[in-house]
Amino acid sequence: MTAAEKELVFRNSASSRWQIGTAVAIVAFGALILWHTITNAALGYPTRAAIVAVGLAIPLFQVVRLARGGVACDARGVVVRNPVRHVRLSWEEIDRFEIHPGTIVGNTAWVHKRDGGRIHIFGIVTNMSRKAADEAQPIVDALNERLAEERHAAMAADGEAHREL
């Protein structure tokens, strides 16, 4: 397997740790609420079961979906892994990667598509901590370098195809 065929995953490790830490805090706080809910005889069984289900689903979603956000790259393109959906883009569809200032979430990375659209990269943010801010720009730079390498390889392959004709 060549370096170009290998899948690379880019995300802020500090952001992932923050998400997992937040999930642990939610579980700890939720455990107190759940204990009170379960032991409260005034609530009916369906109500208690629903509260327990929601109390367990929120931190599970946080750990499974939010903490895994980022970008996975392979020879065909990238997969932007966001909490609700994953989007696959070929290298030909991508114009560039950038960090944009945000209002609520802070500075976050975006994929700018050649057709003028853009996709938010949830797993690359700069406001979680100083470490996250220090990691974000090099991640975006590495993504842009990979994009340039893939474009160069595509142009070289096109040149070889034209010479064979």
Image (cartoon, grey):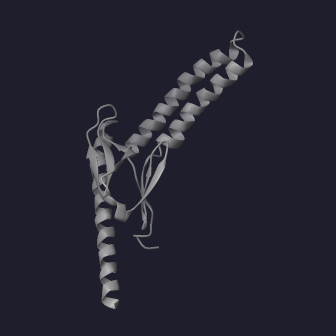
Determine the residue positioned at 51% across, 42% down. Answer: 65
Q: Nearer the viewer, residue 15 or 82?
A: 82
94 relative to 53 in the view: left or right = left
Residue sitting farthest toward the bottom? 164
Q: Using the rendered view, name the quadrant where residue 124 is placed.
A: top left
Question: Percent position (x, y) of residue 9?
Answer: 42, 56
- Say whether residue 99 is left or right of residue 14: left
x, y percent for residue 138: 28, 52
Question: Would you place residue 55 above or below residue 10 in this image?
Answer: above
User: What is the quadrant of the C terminus in the image?
Assistant: bottom left
Q: Position of residue 108 (x, y in %)?
A: 32, 42
Q: Quadrant of residue 55?
A: top right
Tell me if residue 78 comes above or below residue 107 in the rendering.
below
Residue at 33% over, 51% down: 117
Front-lying residue, 141 or 150: 150
Task: Say whether residue 143 is left or right of residue 86.
Answer: left
Q: Which residue lies at the image location 51% right of the left edge and 27% below the top edge? A: 26
Q: Position of residue 154 (x, y in %)?
A: 33, 74
Tally of numbered discs: 0
Residue at image position (26%, 43%) is 100
Image: 123 above or below 79: above
Placement of 133 over or under 156, stated as above or below = above
Q: Residue furthest front?
A: 115
